[in-house]
Image (cartoon, coloured by chain):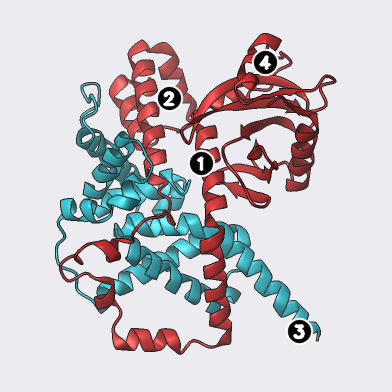
Amino acid sequence: MMDCAQYRRSMLADPHDPDPHLREHRESCHDCTLYSERLLRFESRLERALRVDPVSEGPSSSDNVVPLRGRSRTALRSPAYRKRMFAMAASVLMALVVAGGLWLSAPGTSLAADVVTHMREEPQAWRRTDLPVPDPKLENVLRDSHLRLGAGGGAGMVSYANSCGFRGHKVPHLVLQTEAGPVTVMVLVHERSPKPVQFDEQGYRGVIVPVPGHGSLAVLTRGSSTDIETIEHIAHRVLDSIVWTG
Amino acid sequence: MKDQIGGNQKRARFQALCQSLRPDLLRFAFWLSRDRALAEDVVQETMLRAWKAQDSLQDEAAAKPWFLTIIRREYARCFERKRFVTVDVDELVAREEPMLAAAEEQNLAEMRAALFKLPDEYREPLVLQVLMGFSTAEIARELDLSCGAVLTRLFRARKQLRVLCGEDTSMDPQE
C-alpha cells in the first residue's frame, strides 16, 4: 500500500501520472487530494509559463541590452560559420524561405497554443454526457458576447457552458456532444484570424476559423481519432447556428 | 518529370512538418539556452540540417524527437565553437524580460524567472515533459538516462521550482 510520501514523490515527478495506485491513494487520503489539487494548479501555471511566445513583439534581447559577457550572438557567428551559412545551395534557400514564412504565420499558431493551454485547464469539460446544460445558464454565457444559438440544435447538444478568461477577455467556452464525441467550441470575438488555421498539438486537434466582424471561432477535439475535415464540418455547423445579437 | 513531382511533394510535406513543429522547437531551444537570439540561431541551423538529412526521417510520427535531438546536438555544437563563461541568472532574466513577461501576468513572469534559475539538468527533462509532452521513457531515451534518474530529476526540478516560486512546500515530501 502506497503511503503519502511515496504518493507525493510520484506526483512531483509526474503530476499527470495515470497509475491506478496513485488514484487509489488519492481517493482514500484527504490530505493528498488537497496536495494534488494545489500541485495541479501549480502545474497549470508551469505549463503556461513554459509556453513563451517565440515570436513575441518587442525588442529582441540582442537589440536592447548590452550583450552578456562573452555570449553575444555576434560572437557566436564566426566568419567560418557565416561563410557556411551563405554557402548553402538552392535547396537550403528554400528552407530559409519556409522559416521566414513560419515567422509570419506563427501568431495564428500562438492563438491555437493558447486555446490548447486553456483546454488543459478544464479537463472536466470533456465528459461524455446526455445531460444538456440548462438554457438560462447557456444564455447567460452567450449574452456577453452578443450571440445565441439558433433553435433546432443544429450545432449539437451543449453539455457544458462557461464564461472563461482568455487573453484578457471573457469568452464563451462550450462543449457540444456530437457524432464525433465531445467537441469544444470557443467563441473568440476579440481574436481576429486572417485565415483558417488547423492545429494538432499537445493531444488536441482543431481549427480556428475567421468570423468576419466577430473575431474567430475555435473548435477542437481531444486526441487524434477525429479527422480535421470532420472538425471543420462541425465548425461550419456551429457557425451556421450562431445568431449574432450585437 | 515524375521525379520532379515527387520532389515537390516531398518538399511540401517537409515544409508542413516544419511549420507545425517550429513554435514548440523554438520554445524548447529557448528553455535550453535561456537566450532568444541563440534559440533562433539553433532552430534555424536545425532546420537546415534537418532539410539536408530529411531522408533519414523514416516515420513522420517520430519527427518531434528527431528534431529535438538535432536541436540538442546543435546547441552542444555552439558550446564547442565558443566556450561560454558562467552566466548571471539575474542578468539573463533582465535581458529576456520582453519574452518572459510580454502581456502575461506577473506570476507567470515569476515562474519563468524561477525556471531560469533551475540547473540545466533539471530544467531540460522538465521542459521535455511539460512542454513537449514526452513520457518518462521518451525523456530517458532522449537524454540517455535511466527512467529512475529521469523521475528523480523531475522530482527535484519541481521541488526546487516550488521553493523558488515561494509556494507552500510544507506538505512536500523529503527526498
**Chain identifier of the residue bearing label 2 in the image:** A
Quadrant of the image containing the C terminus of chain B: top left
Q: Earlier in the sequence, mark 1 or mark 2?
A: 2
Q: Which chain is cyan?
A: B
* x and y percentages locating residue A125 in the rendered image: 59, 24
Residue extending farthest front: A246
The answer to which of A19 and A199 lies nearer the viewer is A199
Please tell me whether mark 1 or mark 4 is closer to you in this view.
4
Q: Earlier in the sequence, mark 2 or mark 4?
A: 2
Give neighbour class at mark 2: few <14, some 14-19, many 20+ (Cα, 10 Å): some
**Chain identifier of the residue bearing label 4 in the image:** A
* x and y percentages locating residue A86 in the rendered image: 44, 87
The CA distance from mark 2 to mark 3 is 55 Å
A185 vs B94, left or right, is: right
**Against A30, is B21 above or below?**
below
Tag 3: residue type? Asp
User: Which residue is under mark 3?
Assistant: B3
**Circle 2: element type:** helix
The quarter of the displayed image where residue B69 is located:
bottom left
Q: Residue at x 58, y 74 (%)?
A: B54
The CA distance from mark 1 to mark 2 is 29 Å
Q: Which mark is residue A22?
A: 2
Please tell me whether mark 2 or mark 4 is closer to you in this view.
4
User: Which residue is under mark 4?
Assistant: A139
Please tell me whether mark 1 or mark 2 is closer to you in this view.
1
**Circle 3: element type:** helix
**Chain identifier of the residue bearing label 1 in the image:** A
